[in-house]
Image: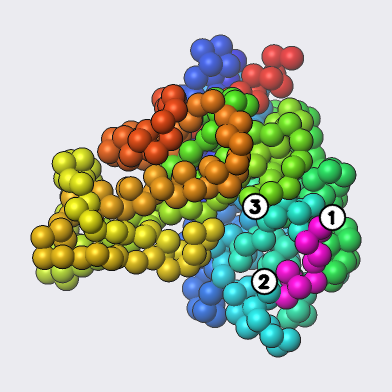
Amino acid sequence: MHCIGIDLGSSSIKGALLDLDCRQVVSVVREPFPAPVTGLPSRHFEVDPVEITAGVRQVIHRLIDIAPAAKAIFFCGQMGGVILTGHDGRPATNYLSWRDQRTLGAHPAGGTYLDQIQQRWSLGEFAELGNELKPGSMTSLLFWLKEHGQLPESAIPATIGDYVIGQLCGIKPRMEPTQAIGLLHLRDGDWHHAAFQKLGIDSLDWLPFADAQTPVGAFAIQNRSLPCFATLGDQQCALRGAGLQEDELSLNISTGSQVSQIAADVIPGNYQTRRYFHGRYLNTITHLPAGRSLNVVLELLTELSRAEGISLSNPWPYIARSASEATSDGLECDLAFFSGPMGESGSLKQITVDNLTVGNLFHAAFRNMAETFQICSARLSPDRTWKRVALSGGLTQSVPILRQLIEQRFAAPIRESVEQEETLTGLLRLAEEVMQS
């Protein structure tokens, strides 16, 4: 039996067949995620939803050609961002991406739009929402639209994945709780209407949550209908696909990185809390430096060659090898180039004429990542309630020295995920539960 899995990412729309008999993800196909709309003001990042829907359709049709008897479609996708739709299904806005930074602009009452949100919410309400508030979060973007008179009354707020499902199935988009970061009253299990009211976004039509195990609609294709399931959070899907256990500390390291741990109950702390699967929660610290910050360093090192029209085919094997042979030699590299829990500006310190080499530089960068993970793990679990470290995301496989530095920091058994398609494997696990129950 085959189902279709769709991972609606920010760089590509990826799909695959979920082979329930062999318990494998097969026939992976990709379409590029559409480019952002041009000509927008600074900090704005919007994408045409019609183009996104067309890309998803294309992926589904390619997979149906391979497996005409596929039984259902399961989705996961990027969290954050927002698109508003009318009750007729038509988009009332573009997709405002989670990359959008407009809420960092100055608010007329002082501070930024994010600052204003924090002033309007109590600490208790913020904790009830899982300590979730980012520049591109749904709540912050909706607040910006409200403050600028651009929030249509009674519109339906949706993630981009659920908007696409609505278009495919001709239904109103409904959100599954793993996608509802910064929107859900974690203990009550419902929208946090009191928090919405303080931002002036309570007039929107907040539809009932979808159940991950029940189809929300059906997509008509080739004279039959394929049941479609609501979009799941891509972070949670990836960790499920990597086989995260309740006694493990997760280090998911890729373009970005997160430190996470499954929890049986909501226990507020200096971290974010999100809904997970099977009635569990995920305590997590996200937006930690990883591949995106490493690429900033690489861009600097390759600027002169690019200016001369020379393109390096793949510098990473040399970087990994040189870093493994280096010691940093006193060089310090702080990778917090992007706003996040570790700050919003990085640094390079303790430079000498002897230690400024590619190997030392990247060894220092990888060491900084390992130190960050250790600091965040102590914040997440001060009593160290985990027994093992679970690595996922793929970066430690291509950069073995990073794994070695993590091993030195944690002094604990380490398990590394071997799954190449962790988010799609997470969808496979859900499909097994739903289709074989």
User: Label 3's element?
Assistant: loop
Could you tell me which residue is drawn at 71 percent across and 21 percent down? 434
**Amino acid of disc 2:** Leu
| Residue 118 drawn at (x, y percent) | 73, 69
Question: How would you rate the neighbour count of disc 2 (Cα within 10 Å): few for under 14, some for 14-19, many for 20 or more?
Answer: many
Q: Which of marks 1 and 3 is in front?
A: 3
Could you tell which of marks 1 and 2 lies nearer the N-terminus? 2
426 and 326: which is toward the camera:
326
Whole-percent x, y for residue 349 in the image: 28, 66
Q: How far apart are marks 3 and 2 (CA)?
A: 18 Å
SS at badge 1: loop
Compare marks 3 and 2 and give the one earlier in the sequence.
Answer: 2
Q: Mark 3 points at which residue?
A: 270
Q: In the image, residue 93 lies at what x, y percent?
A: 69, 67
Inspect the image, locate mark 1, and give the three-letter code of the amino acid beneath it: His
- Dot 1 or dot 3, earlier in sequence: 1
- Residue 413 visible in rendering: yes
Secondary-structure class at tag 2: helix
Identify the residue under disc 2.
114
Position of 171 with respect to 1 (left or right) is right
Residue stretch in magenta: 116-125
The residue sitting at 76% across, 79% down in the picture is 147
- The residue to which callout 1 is attached is 192
Above or below, 218 against 101 in this view is above
Looking at the figure, which quarter contains the C terminus?
A: top right
Identify residue type, mark 3. Answer: Asn
